[in-house]
Image (spheres, rainbow, N blue to C red):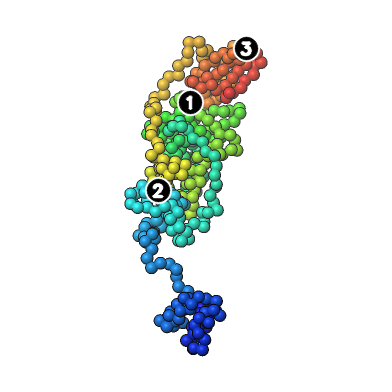
Amino acid sequence: MVAQREEFVRLATGGGVPIAELCRRFEISRKTGYKWLERFREGGREALDDRSRRPHRSPRQTPEELVQVILAQRHKHPRWGARKLRRLLLNQGLGEVPAASTVNDVLDRAGLLEANRASHPGPFQRFEDPQPNGTWQMDFKGPVELPAATVYLLSILDDHSRFLISLQVCPDQRRETVQQRLTTAFRQFGLPDRILIDNGSPWGYTTDHPYTELTAWLLRLGIGVTHGRPYHPQTQGKVERLNGTIEAEMLLGAHFPDLAAFVHACDGFRDVYNTERPHCALGLDTPLSHYCPSPRRFPEQLPPIVYGPDDEVRKVSRDGVITFRGRRFRSGKAFRGQPVAIRPTTADGQFAIFFCNHHVADIDIATSAHNEGA
C-alpha cells in the first residue's frame, strides 16, 4: 500500500498527467490524492506510512494511574477476574471505578487472561441454607508436604454466607485434633444447627457404623450431622470449591520454608477470603458482610442427658451393645458409656433408639432385627 502511494506522488509531481486523471487511474478520490501529496511534501516517503487512527486525545481512556492500580491488585490476587477486582476497588473507596468490561480490557491488554479463560467451570446449580449457622460444611484438604512436616488443612465454611469459620493447620486427621479445633470455633462463633461432612476420617460413615465418637459428641451438643453421598463430592460443593480456591490462590507455586510460614499464609488467606475477596455467589459481597455469629453458646461443661419418664433407658456397653427385653442389640461403639432411650414405634414389636434428641437406630423384637443409624 505504501509503495502504491509513493508511485502515485512520484507520478503526480513529475507532471504530464493531471491529478484528477491519476486519481481515477489509482481508483482513489481526489481528496485522498491531494492528502498523499501534502503528506509527501511535508515529510517525504516516511510520511506515506499508515498512521494510527487513535485520536490525539482520549477522554474516556482509563488513566494510567488506575491501570497500574488494577494490575497491582491482579498481581496480588492473580486468580481474581475483572468483576472481583472491580468490586475490590469499590470497597477500597477508590473513587470512580471503571466497569468490569474495562477492567477486563486492562487485563487483556496486559496478557493476563489467557491462562484463566479455559479453566472456568461453567454454570452450575446452587443451593444454600437460608440463614447463617444453619449448616456448616467441614472438610480436610491434604496432605500438604512442608520441608519438615506433613500437615492437613481443616476447613469449616458457613453454607449461607460462605464465611470461612476456620482454616486450621492440623498434624493429623484424628478425632481429638478435630474436636479441639471445633471447640475453638464453637467458642468464638457459637454452635451451628448442623454440620455437613463427607465420609472420611474421623467422621466416616458406613452402613454398619454410621456414627463415630466425634459425631456422637456433636449430637450431644445439639448439632445435627449430615453425611454427603459417597463418591458425590458435589454434595459438599461449597467446601470443595473452597478447597479449589485454596489450591489456586494460596498453594499453587508457593514455597513455605517452615510450618510457621504456612500457618501465617493460612491466616492471611482466611482474612482476605472473608473480608476482601468479592464472592460471585453473594453478588460480589464479601462473606463477612453476610455472616453473624450463632446465638447458641458453646457449653464448657456438657449438660446431663435427660430422657422422658416413659423412655426405657439403657447404658451402652464398651462393645456398643445394649440389653433390652432379654436380648442384646448393637447401638454403636460411638455411644459406649452413654445412656440411650428406647421408645416404641407405631409398628408392633419395633422400637427406636435415641441418643439425646437424635434417632440413631431401630430394633425389632419380633425378628431380633437391628437397623443402626435409621
Of tags 3 and 1, the one toward the viewer is 3
Q: How crowded is mark 2: few (under 14 residues within 10 Å), some or many (20 or more)?
A: many
Q: Residues within 10 Å of mark 1 (few under 14, many from 20)?
A: some
Q: Please state which amino acid type lies under the numbered disc 3.
A: Asp
Secondary structure beneath dot 2 equals helix
- Earlier residue among tags 2 and 1: 2
Residue toward you, 268 or 147: 268
Question: Residue 75, position in %: x, y?
Answer: 42, 56
Q: In this view, does 244 lie above or below 14?
A: above
> What is the quadrant of residue 363 in the picture?
top right
The residue most toward the right is: 367
Are the residues flagged by discs 3 and 1 in contact, CB closer than 8 Å?
Answer: no
Q: Is residue 280 above or below residue 331?
A: below
Q: In which quarter of the image is the C terminus?
A: top right
Question: Residue 186, position in %: x, y?
Answer: 40, 32
Are the residues flagged by discs 2 and 3 in contact, CB closer than 8 Å?
Answer: no
Label drawn at residue 219:
1
- Earlier residue among tags 2 and 3: 2
Q: Name the residue under label 2.
A: 87
Q: How crowded is mark 3: few (under 14 residues within 10 Å), some or many (20 or more)?
A: few
Question: Residue 276, position in %: x, y?
Answer: 39, 46
Q: Please state which amino acid type lies under the numbered disc 1.
A: Leu
Label drawn at residue 348:
3
In this view of the protein, can residue 122 be seen by the observer? yes
Mark 2 to mark 3: distance in Å?
Answer: 62 Å
In this view of the protein, can residue 47 be seen by the observer? no
